[in-house]
Image: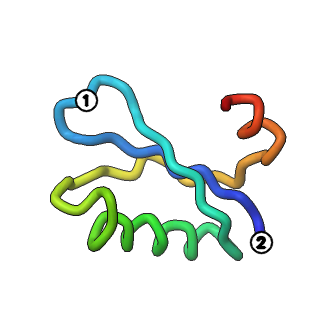
Amino acid sequence: MSLFLVKYELDGDQSPHKRYYHAMDKQTAKSMFNETCRSGTLTGYNPKILEINQANEKKKEKEK
């Protein structure tokens, strides 16, 4: 498994948002994000995916 960073924007927000997913590949991370939009914490929003990239786990820990 790898860590993937999904950057997305929501209507009305000036800066992009991001979420991390542990997934087998980029397509799986996208599917996981779409499920979050369909029946998770982003239900009711219409986010636009800006990019999906494999992330460096050490970099994520520094952001905390």
With respect to residue 43, does 51 lie above or below?
A: above
With respect to residue 1, does 47 lie above or below?
A: above
Label total for image: 2
Looking at the image, tell me whether mark 2 or mark 1 is earlier in sequence order: 2
* In the displayed structure image, the side of residue 37 where residue 25 appears, left or right: right
Q: Determine whether the residue tagged by mark 2 lies in a helix, strand or loop.
A: loop
Q: Quadrant of the C terminus?
A: top right
* In the displayed structure image, the side of residue 22 where residue 6 appears, left or right: left
Report x, y in % for residue 52.
Answer: 56, 54
Q: Quadrant of residue 39?
A: bottom left
Residue at 68% over, 29% down: 63
Which residue ends up furthest to the top in the rendered image? 14
Q: Which label belongs to residue 1?
A: 2
Residue at 37% over, 26% down: 15
* In the displayed structure image, the side of residue 6 where residue 64 appears, left or right: right
Q: Quadrant of the N terminus?
A: bottom right
Q: Which residue is mark 1?
A: 13
Residue at 79% over, 46% down: 56
Q: How is the image coloured?
A: rainbow
Residue at 72% over, 48% down: 55
Report x, y in % for residue 36.
Answer: 37, 66
Task: Please state which amino acid type lies under the numbered disc 1.
Answer: Asp
Which residue ends up furthest to the right in the rendered image? 58
Badge 1: residue crowd in 10 Å (few <14, some 14–19, many ≥20): few
As rendered, which of 7 and 40 lies closer to the eye?
A: 40
Measure the alpha-carbon separation of dots 2 and 1: 31 Å
Report x, y in % for residue 6.
Answer: 52, 51
Badge 2: residue crowd in 10 Å (few <14, some 14–19, many ≥20): few
Q: Which label belongs to residue 42?
A: none
